[in-house]
C-alpha cells in the first residue's frame, strides 16, 4: 500500500453530514447567487480584486474591503508611501502595510501582463500556478481566492475556516501547522472528494463553510 492510500484509509469516516445538508438547504440559493455574481465581475474590477486578495492575509476581510475602497478613491495603486498610510488607518488597518503597499505597486506595474495571462489561460489551476510564480505576495490560498472572486471555479481557498470545517466533517484528520504547495494540493484533493461524496460542489461548500463561521456569505 502506498503512503497516499494509507493516509486516506486512516482518515475517520465523514461526520455530521445531515447537519451540513441542513445548513446548505437554508443557504443554497444565496450561495449560488453569490457565485453567479463572481462570474459577472467586469475586467476593470480585476485589479481591485487582486489588491483585496493581497491584503487579506493576517487581516480581516472587512478591513481589506475598506482598504480597497480607500485606495481606489485615492488613486494611489502605484504610490506605496501613500498606500501604506491608508493601510494604517483604523477602519482599513492592514498588517504589514508597508510590504503590502509595495506588493500592490509591483502588481500594478505588471498588471497588463497579468491581465493577458487571465485571458490566455483557461485552466484555473494552471492559471493559479502562474500567478503564484509571478505575483509577489500571492500564495496558493490568495491566488485561489482571487480567481474565485473573478469567476473561476473548482479551486480550494484553504484558510483556517475551511480547514476547521473539513476536520469537523472528517475530511481531515488534523489541521496542518503550515501549508506547503504539496500539502495544499493534497488537501484540495481531499476537499474535492469530500464535496463529491456529500453532493455539494466544492465552490459552494467553501462559501457554506465561511457562512457557518461568520454568519455572512462574503467574497
Image (cartoon, rainbow, N blue to C red):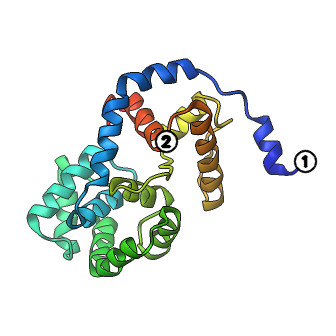
Task: Please give the name of the residue rendered at 16% of the width and 62% of the height, measured from the top-left corner.
Answer: 71
Above or below residue 107? Residue 31 is above
Tag 2 residue = 160
Task: Choose between 46 and 28: the one closer to the eye.
Answer: 28
Q: Residues within 10 Å of mark 2 (few under 14, many from 20)?
A: few
Disc 2 element: helix
Task: Please give the name of the residue rendered at 27% of the width and 47% of the height, measured from the top-left corner.
Answer: 37
Task: Choose between 92 and 214: the one closer to the eye.
Answer: 214
Residue 219 visible, this orientation? no
Task: Please give the name of the residue rendered at 63% of the width and 49% of the height, measured from the top-left corner.
Answer: 189
Q: Position of residue 196 (x, y in %)?
A: 59, 38
Rendering quarter of residue 9: top right
Extreme residue in the right direction: 1
Q: Position of residue 73 (x, y in %)?
A: 9, 62
Q: Which mark is residue 80?
A: none
Above or below residue 199? Residue 60 is below
Dot 2 or dot 1: first in sequence order is 1
Task: Please give the name of the residue rendered at 54% of the width and 18% of the height, measured from the top-left corner.
Answer: 18
Tag 1 residue = 1
Q: Nearer the viewer, mark 2 or mark 1?
A: 1
Amino acid at each position: 500500500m502506498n503512503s497516499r492510500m494509507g493516509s486516506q484509509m486512516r482518515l475517520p469516516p465523514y461526520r455530521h453530514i445531515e447537519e451540513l445538508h441542513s445548513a446548505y438547504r437554508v443557504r443554497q440559493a444565496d450561495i449560488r447567487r453569490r457565485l453567479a455574481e463572481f462570474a459577472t465581475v467586469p475586467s476593470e474590477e480585476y485589479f481591485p480584486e487582486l489588491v483585496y486578495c493581497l491584503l487579506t492575509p493576517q487581516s480581516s476581510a472587512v478591513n481589506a474591503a475598506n482598504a480597497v475602497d480607500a485606495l481606489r478613491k485615492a488613486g494611489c495603486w502605484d504610490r506605496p508611501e501613500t498606500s501604506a498610510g491608508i493601510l494604517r488607518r483604523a477602519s482599513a488597518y492592514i498588517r504589514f502595510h508597508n510590504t503590502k503597499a509595495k506588493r500592490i505597486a509591483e502588481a500594478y506595474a505588471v498588471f497588463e501582463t497579468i491581465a493577458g495571462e487571465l485571458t490566455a489561460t483557461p485552466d484555473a489551476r494552471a492559471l493559479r500556478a502562474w500567478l503564484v510564480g509571478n505575483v509577489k505576495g500571492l500564495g496558493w490560498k490568495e491566488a485561489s481566492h482571487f480567481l474565485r472572486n473573478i469567476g473561476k471555479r473548482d479551486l480550494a481557498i484553504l484558510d483556517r475556516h475551511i480547514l476547521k470545517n473539513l476536520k469537523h466533517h472528517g475530511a481531515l484528520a488534523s489541521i496542518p501547522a503550515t501549508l506547503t504547495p504539496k500539502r495544499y494540493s493534497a488537501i484540495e484533493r481531499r476537499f474535492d472528494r469530500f464535496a463529491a461524496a456529500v453532493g455539494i460542489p466544492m465552490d459552494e461548500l467553501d462559501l457554506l463553510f465561511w457562512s457557518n463561521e461568520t454568519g455572512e456569505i462574503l467574497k
